Image: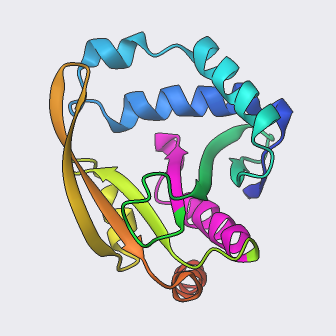
Amino acid sequence: MMNVRKANRKDAKGIAHVHVQSWRETYKGIINQDYLDSLDEDKRYHMWKESLETNGDQPLFVAENDAGEIIGFASFGKERTKKFEIDGELYAIYILAEFKGKKVGTKLFLAGVQELLRQDIKSLLVWVISNNPSKRFYESFNPIKVKEEEFRIAGEELIEVAYSWNDLNALKTSLVSSLEDK
């Protein structure tokens, strides 16, 4: 059994662990290994601790396993670039590799979408590294491809793809339906 709930200040350490570990698992072979090895849980802990203390209204959800350990998280908010006529953004979903394919991401995504709808946000954007295998997760919910951009990380040029959903209620229905298709 797995539980999804809104994150609180005490979750910073678990979120930091998932953040670093999932980057190492997901981006192995995509992002420079030295960079991945240099990721520091303690630095991420302080970043998430501060974020949880100062951005309390920003939707951040965690998924826990039966032992109450954080196995994934998702962060949402207002669309940051203002380049698109989209009002919400999925900033991140990260899940430990051993829990992928078990609907954890879908449950986290749904929790965030429901919260954004309560905040009267009607559309959503997400940026995904183009060769990230998790890109298929987003594509399974039929987004619109909005843009591709090059960016640099760890001295490498990568391509990021922006996807959008212009109707959050329709996305919510798709997420619920996906959870019912066990």
Q: Nearer the viewer, residue 151 or 84?
A: 84
Horizontal arrangement in the rendering, residue 112 relative to residue 67 (left or right): left
> Where 82 falls versus 17 (above or below)?
below
Residue 119 in percent (x, y) is at 74, 71
> Which residue is located at x 51 percent, y 50 percent?
91
Q: Nearer the viewer, residue 108 or 164?
A: 164
Horizontal arrangement in the rendering, residue 178 relative to residue 27 (left or right): right
- Kindly tell me whether residue 102 is visible in this rendering: no
Residue 154 in percent (x, y) is at 25, 20
- Kindly tell me whether residue 166 is visible in this rendering: yes
Q: Is residue 181 magenta?
A: no
> Which residue is located at x 59 percent, y 87 percent?
169
> Which residue is located at x 71 percent, y 51 percent?
58
Which residue sits furthest left?
157
> Which residue is located at x 55 percent, y 81 percent?
168
Q: Which residues are magenta?
A: 89-117
Q: Is residue 96 magenta?
A: yes
Quarter of the image where the N terminus is located: bottom right
Q: Nearer the viewer, residue 118 or 170?
A: 118
